[in-house]
Image (cartoon, rainbow, N blue to C red):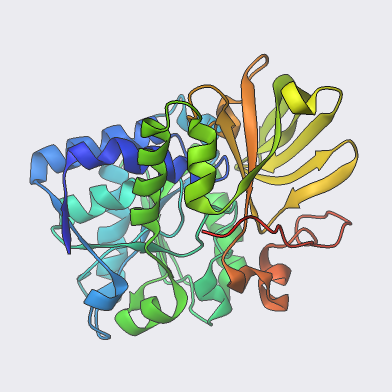
Amino acid sequence: MREITADHLPDLARGAAVLGTGGGGDPFVGRLLAEQALKRNGPVTLLGLDEIDDGAFIVPTAFMGAPTVMLEKLPSGDEIIGAMRALEELLGRKATHTVSIEAGGLNSMSPFVAAAEAGVPLIDADGMGRAFPELQMLLPTLGGVQASPMALADERGNSVTLRTAGNAWAERLARAATVEMGCSAAVSLYALTGRQAKDHLVPGTLTLCERVGRAIREGHEDPVAAAAGVLGGRTVFTGKIGDVQRTTTGGFARGTARLTGLDADTGSALELSFQNENLVATRDGEVVVSVPDLICVLDTDSGEPVTTETLRYGLRVSVLGVPCDPRWRTPEGLDLAGPGYFGYAHEYVPFPGAEV
C-alpha cells in the first residue's frame, strides 16, 4: 500500500504515455486533471492486486474517443466521476476500488480522478499492459468478463447506460454515443470482482509507469536507452519525421507517419501506421514490430513520449519495440488484437525484446 500525491504524477504520466504506444490521451492533460483532484481531496491509496479481497467491487474508468479531439476539447474531470456514478446507480452498488483499463498518458491518470473524488483506493494494475484503440481489446474479454453494463458521460452532464450483447457490441454502440458527445467521453465499464481482477488484469502497471518515467527523467545521457532498459525493449529505428498523414474519423485518429533514418539508420525509412495507437512499424518495406507488441515513439534527445496526435514534421524520434503481455500472444489474444484484426496481411512475429 502506498499513498500517491501530486508529486508522484509527473513520472507516472510520462511513463504511462510510453506504455500507451502513442495512444491513451495526452499525458499533460491527464496529469493536470489528476493533480487538481488530489489537491482537492488529498492523496490516493494505491494497492497491489494481492492486497484486495476476492469480493471487492472494482469499477474501472477511462476516456474514450479520438486523442486529436481531446487536444482542443479538453476534459473537465467531471465526466469521469459522472460515468462512475451512473454505472454504480445502474448496478445498485458502490465501488470499493477503481482501476485503469489501459496504460496511456490520460487513461492512466483519469482513475486517479475517480479514486480521489469517490474516496476509494486505486489498484496498481490495468487491463492491457498497454493501450489499444477499441474497448473490447482487454484481457478480461479473453477471460469472459463482460464490458457491460457500462456508462458514458460528457462535460455537458449527459450520461448514457448500455447493456450489450457482447463486448464487440459494447465498442460499436459506445463509439457511436462518443461521436455524438463530440468524439470524447468518459466511460465506466468492465465492473470486476477482486477475484476477476487478480485473474485477468496486468499487475504492477502504475508502478512500472513510474519507473519508466523516472528512468527518462534521470537518464540524462541516453533517456531512450534508460526507458528501453526498464521495459525490456530495444530501439528499432532513429530518425526524423518527414511526413504525417492523419485524419479523425469514426471516433479514431487514423494515419501514417514516415521517418527518414539518422545516425546508424541513415539511408533507411520507417513507416508507422496508427489507429489512436501505433499498430505497425515497417522498415524499408519489412515489418519490424506490430500489434500486439508495443511500438513506442520517444523524442530522441529528451526521451519524452510522442503521442500520435502530436507527431509532427521535423521531430527527431526513436522508435522502441517492447514485448507485450504473453496472454496477447495466444491464438485468442491475436484474434482480438493482432495484425489480422486491423486488416494487415502479415503474420504476427513476436518481438524478442531484451531480458529485464
Residue 136 is situated, as x and y percent measured from the top left of the image, at 57, 65
Is residue 244 something one can see in this rendering? Answer: no
Q: Nearer the viewer, residue 237 or 184?
A: 237
Residue 115 is situated, as x and y percent measured from the top left of the image, at 21, 55
Furthest residue to the top? 314
Q: Which residue is pictured at 49% across the width and 42% down the height? A: 227
Q: Which residue is pictured at 48% across the width and 79% down the height? A: 145
The answer to whether residue 54 is left or right of residue 350 is left
The answer to whether residue 283 is left or right of residue 279 is right
Is residue 195 something one can see in this rendering? Answer: yes
Q: Which image quadrant for residue 156?
A: top left
Quarter holding the N terminus is bottom left
Q: Is residue 35 shown above or below 99?
A: above
Q: Nearer the viewer, residue 125 or 288?
A: 288
Q: Which residue is pictured at 55% across the width and 54% down the height? A: 232
Q: Nearer the viewer, residue 2 or 301?
A: 301
Q: Which residue is pictured at 67% across the width and 14% down the height? A: 314
Residue 343 is situated, as x and y percent measured from the top left of the image, at 82, 55
Residue 168 is situated, as x and y percent measured from the top left of the image, at 62, 67
